Image: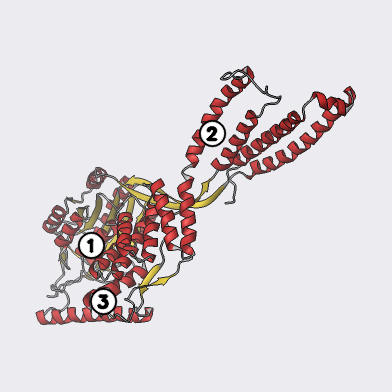
């Protein structure tokens, strides 16, 4: 996108400037020619005062310039970038389907897996337009389709859901609930999880996971696939012929039964409902009605940067020029008139200017908002030049002019951080981070810098909490993850204070982006000065994970636990 939205009007403005100049010289030449026909120019100049000719020239110039700037305003000049976010109200729901081996049982036609997919299609059609996602689970959980409003994409990816999609055997319903809760937890309000399973949970504590889901606002609706009587699990060849059945530990054919009791307990723990699938699949529509009755939440559907429209500036100039032109009389004013009494022509002229004056005042009052933006822009330039005290004054001035804008508050905290006014910086960053009306990116950066401020004050516990809140907003922020690790280490083993050395503090990592007063500037990220290299940090994280795994294995051996408790992998 260029500097002007409608460049054609800019070309028209340039054409008008050229035409007005040519018109002026042509009209002057014709005027002089007409005057020469009436008499000697020296004699005529006594009849027409020179100042009248000068006023006439200036009126023409002001008129032409006013029209020029009007055309420039119509061209839509734009500069500076602002972040625009679009919000939409809707419901977030995840469909989690069991793909363990027991879903091949044929106690419902043609088998449990086919029945579950048919029920899922009914639910997806009923929730068209909402944000949907699909999970598949067996011994662990796998994301088939992330949360999206693309209804066609969800249906197309549903075709890939088959028994065996998840390589690890078993049925871990609790893991599926935890994964769905973590995914849905990023969205406010009430959410829904639809579980399609035979209810034979072989791993973990699904009820505990359901209670955690309820705390996060996730309602669980369970569709039980199968029958209470159950059926053996067939093994088929590539041609679809049954070659045998899955056997249990005694060598007999294993019978998989619908676990309704555990499913009902699960749904009750998560403030949902349980339904057994039927031939007419009416329960799918009932679940859809339940979900659609949930309170819709407003979420950010998209965000984009767009240029700011600056048409007000040339429009204000145009109105001022035209206003000045109207104030200049064509003829000479009388030098004197009775006190308090203006000539009738002047009074009429002033009355005609009243509407234009009101319009100009209204426009200029709207342009006054730009004062805060100018202060932000100048403050950012001073900040980049290392003049943190001056930049703080600019940001405070902008804050006074626009108290509802988070950008001056955020940038003031940044300047205070550089001035080592950490207590005030913490207040600024906390105010922005706790304001849920701000964009996630702005809140993420505020919590990041809040953690840095706490770290510089040796408040390691508070720094840890701030970094955690940063990661809750953006789990992919590697800088925040690194600083969290350092804060945890410092909390466990506080660094020794050395009067001869500067206190350990975040190391500046310059960020070339500058907002120029256009959007909240992300302060330079930091890492503790004595921080390890990235390779050392990765080795440390691997060592921690290996130690945790080793501890879990040792605890399992002490309890005498080997593999799954039941030994059932279907």
Residue 393 percent across, percent down from the top left: 42, 55
Residue located at (62% from left, 33% from top): 324
Q: Nearer the viewer, residue 518 or 36?
A: 36
Mark linked to residue 360 = 2
Q: Could you classify mark 2 by the number of other residues whose Cα lies within 10 Å: few (under 14), some (14-19), or many (20 or more)?
A: some
Decide if residue 163 is in sight here: no
Residue count near mark 1 (Cα–Cα under 10 Å), binned few <14, some 14–19, many ≥20: some
Q: Are marks 1 and 3 in contact (CB under 8 Å)?
A: no
Viewer-nearest residue: 392 or 462: 392
Residue that label 1 marks:
178
Residue 185 position in % (x across, y down): 27, 57
Residue visible at 38% across and 57% down in the picture: 412
**Quadrant assignment, res 328:** top right
Mark 3 sits on what residue?
489
Q: Is mark 1 on a helix, strand or loop?
A: helix
Above-or-below relation of 418 to 78: below
Badge 3 marks a residue whose secondary structure is helix
Q: Do the residues labelled 2 and 1 touch (CB within 8 Å)?
A: no
Position in image of residue 263 (x %, y %): 15, 57
Marks 3 and 2: which is nearer the front? 2
| 220 is higher (above) or lower (below) than 479 | above
Instruction: Give the residue displayed 59% in from the left and 50% down from the top.
Output: 3
The CA distance from mark 3 to mark 2 is 61 Å
Between the C-alphas of marks 2 and 1, the distance is 60 Å
Q: Which of marks 2 and 1 is in front?
A: 2
Packing grade of label 3 (10 A; few <14, some 14-19, many >=20) is few
């Amino acid at each position: 996108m260029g500097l002007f939205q409608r460049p054609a009007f800019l070309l028209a403005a340039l054409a008008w400037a050229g035409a007005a100049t040519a018109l002026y010289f042509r009209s002057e030449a014709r005027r002089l020619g007409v005057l020469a026909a009436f008499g000697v120019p020296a004699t005529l100049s006594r009849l027409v005062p020179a100042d009248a000719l000068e006023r006439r020239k200036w009126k023409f110039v002001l008129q032409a310039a006013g029209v020029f700037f009007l055309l420039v305003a119509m061209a839509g000049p734009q500069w500076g970038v602002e972040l625009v976010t679009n919000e939409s109200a809707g419901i977030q729901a995840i469909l989690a389907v069991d793909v363990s081996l027991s879903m091949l049982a044929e106690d419902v036609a043609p088998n449990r897996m086919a029945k579950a997919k048919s029920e899922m299609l009914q639910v997806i059609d009923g929730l068209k337009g909402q944000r949907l996602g699909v999970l598949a689970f067996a011994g662990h959980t796998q994301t088939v389709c992330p949360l999206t409003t693309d209804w066609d994409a969800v249906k197309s990816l549903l075709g890939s859901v088959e028994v065996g999609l998840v390589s690890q055997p078993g049925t871990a319903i609790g893991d599926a609930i935890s994964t769905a809760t973590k995914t849905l937890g990023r969205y406010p309000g009430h959410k829904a999880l639809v579980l399609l399973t035979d209810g034979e949970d072989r791993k973990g504590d699904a009820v505990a996971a359901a209670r955690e889901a309820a705390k996060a606002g996730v309602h669980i609706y369970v569709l039980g696939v199968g029958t209470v009587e159950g059926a053996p699990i067939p093994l088929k060849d590539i041609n679809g012929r049954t070659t045998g059945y899955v056997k249990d530990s005694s060598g007999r054919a294993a019978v998989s039964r619908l676990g309704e009791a555990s499913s009902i307990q699960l749904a009750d723990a998560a403030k949902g409902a349980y339904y057994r699938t039927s031939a007419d699949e009416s329960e799918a529509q009932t679940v859809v009605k339940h979900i659609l009755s949930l309170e819709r939440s407003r979420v950010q559907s998209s965000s984009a940067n767009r240029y700011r429209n600056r048409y007000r500036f040339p429009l204000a100039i145009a109105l001022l020029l035209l206003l000045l032109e109207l104030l200049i009389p064509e003829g000479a004013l009388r030098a004197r008139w009775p006190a308090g009494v203006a000539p009738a022509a002047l009074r009429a002229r002033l009355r005609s200017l009243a509407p234009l004056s009101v319009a100009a005042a209204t426009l200029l009052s709207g342009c006054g908002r730009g004062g805060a933006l100018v202060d932000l822009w100048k403050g950012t330039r001073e900040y980049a030049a290392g003049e943190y005290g001056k930049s703080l004054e600019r940001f405070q001035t902008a804050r006074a002019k626009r108290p509802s804008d988070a950008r001056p508050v955020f940038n003031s905290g940044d300047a205070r951080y550089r001035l080592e006014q950490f207590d005030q910086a913490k207040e600024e960053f906390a105010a922005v981070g706790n304001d849920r009306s701000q964009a996630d990116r702005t809140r993420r950066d505020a919590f990041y810098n809040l953690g840095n401020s706490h770290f510089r004050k040796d408040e390691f516990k508070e720094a840890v909490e701030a970094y955690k809140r940063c990661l809750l907003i953006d789990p992919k922020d590697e800088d925040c993850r690194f600083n969290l690790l350092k804060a945890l280490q410092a909390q466990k083993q506080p660094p020794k204070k050395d009067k001869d050395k500067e206190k350990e503090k975040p190391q500046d990592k310059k960020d070339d982006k500058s907002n120029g007063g256009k959007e909240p500037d992300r302060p330079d990220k930091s890492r503790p000065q004595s921080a390890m290299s990235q390779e050392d940090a990765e080795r440390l994280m691997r060592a921690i994970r290996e130690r945790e795994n080793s501890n879990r294995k040792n605890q399992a051996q002490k309890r005498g636990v080997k593999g799954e408790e039941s030994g059932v992998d279907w």
